[in-house]
Image: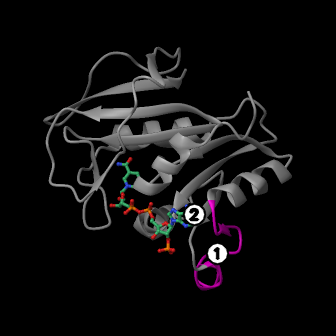
Amino acid sequence: MSKTNLNLIAAACENMGIGVNGTLPWRLKKEMAYFTTMTSKVRDPSKKNAVIMGRKTWDSIPPKFSPLSNRVNIVLTRNVDQVKSKVPESVVVVPSLDEAIKYIESREDIELTWVIGGSSVYKASMEYPNCYKIYLTVIEKLFDCDTFFPNIDDQRFRLIQEEDVPTERQVEGDITYLYKVYKRL
Ligand SMILES: NC(=O)c1ccc[n+]([C@@H]2O[C@H](COP(=O)([O-])OP(=O)(O)OC[C@H]3O[C@@H](n4cnc5c(N)ncnc54)[C@H](OP(=O)(O)O)[C@@H]3O)[C@@H](O)[C@H]2O)c1
């Protein structure tokens, strides 16, 4: 597998909602820990993974967790200079998904690429020839949302089982959810 194969990761509720008012509609500690583990873990300890996100997702990360630790944070924006002036120096700011991928190709120390949202970045990534897998947490509840995960085309993506992804239903408080993995056909 190439390091520029795109792995998408998202949590969506019953209507495929992923966000509201610039933040997450729910608070799920274990689910957040799953996100951190999946996007951070590497086989080669001398390497790190890259996380690609839209500028609004970057803005949604609470300051104490930003930049996301032990990962190369890459932010997409059409206003590169403006965003660059506001983020820590370690954060890579690029004007397109293609530029993000070129940057990752140029770095020997990146193992995997994770696309962490939001809507338009997921959509562009799903159309990208190197789109590989979608890690979707399906939350079995309806939340008020203004941001949504794009439609997953079942002609192009198939549900698979992955060794290190739990198949049993997860429970946190009164919320239940499932970890699903889709692979591009
Ligand atoms: N549940 C989940 O798994 C999950 C994951 C991620 C985010 N979220 C939620 O989703 C919301 C944020 O997502 P969003 O969809 O509103 O915004 P987003 O995709 O994070 O950010 C959109 C911005 O990214 C930049 N951008 C996007 N595509 C680009 C491209 N191809 N080239 C260059 N720049 C590009 C633009 O920035 P400029 O305006 O600066 O040009 C655009 O306005 C929040 O509520 C967040 O909490 C949820």
Magenta-drawn stretch contains 93 = yes
Residue lying at 26% horizontally and 50% vertically, measured from the top left = 27
Q: Decide: is 52 above or below 185.
A: below
- Asked where in the image residue 175 lies, by quadrant, the reply is top left
Vertical side of 17 occupied by 97: above or below = below
Q: Amino acid at mark 1?
A: Pro
According to the picture, the residue beneath numbered tag 2 turns out to be 67
Q: Are the residues tagged 2 and 1 within 8 Å (C-beta)?
A: yes
Instruction: Confirm whether the magenta stretch covers residue 15.
Output: no
The first of marks 2 and 1 along the sequence is 2
Q: Which mark is residue 88?
A: 1
State the separation of the CA atoms marked 2 and 1.
8 Å
Name above or below for residue 134 compared with residue 102. above
Query: Is residue 133 shown above or below 39?
Result: above
Q: Secondary structure at mark 1?
A: loop
Residue located at (19% from left, 32% from top): 140
Task: Tell me if 26 is positioned left or right of 60 in this view.
Answer: left
Where on the picture, by quarter, is residue 172? Answer: top left
Residue type marked 2: Pro
Residue 158 visible in the snapshot: yes
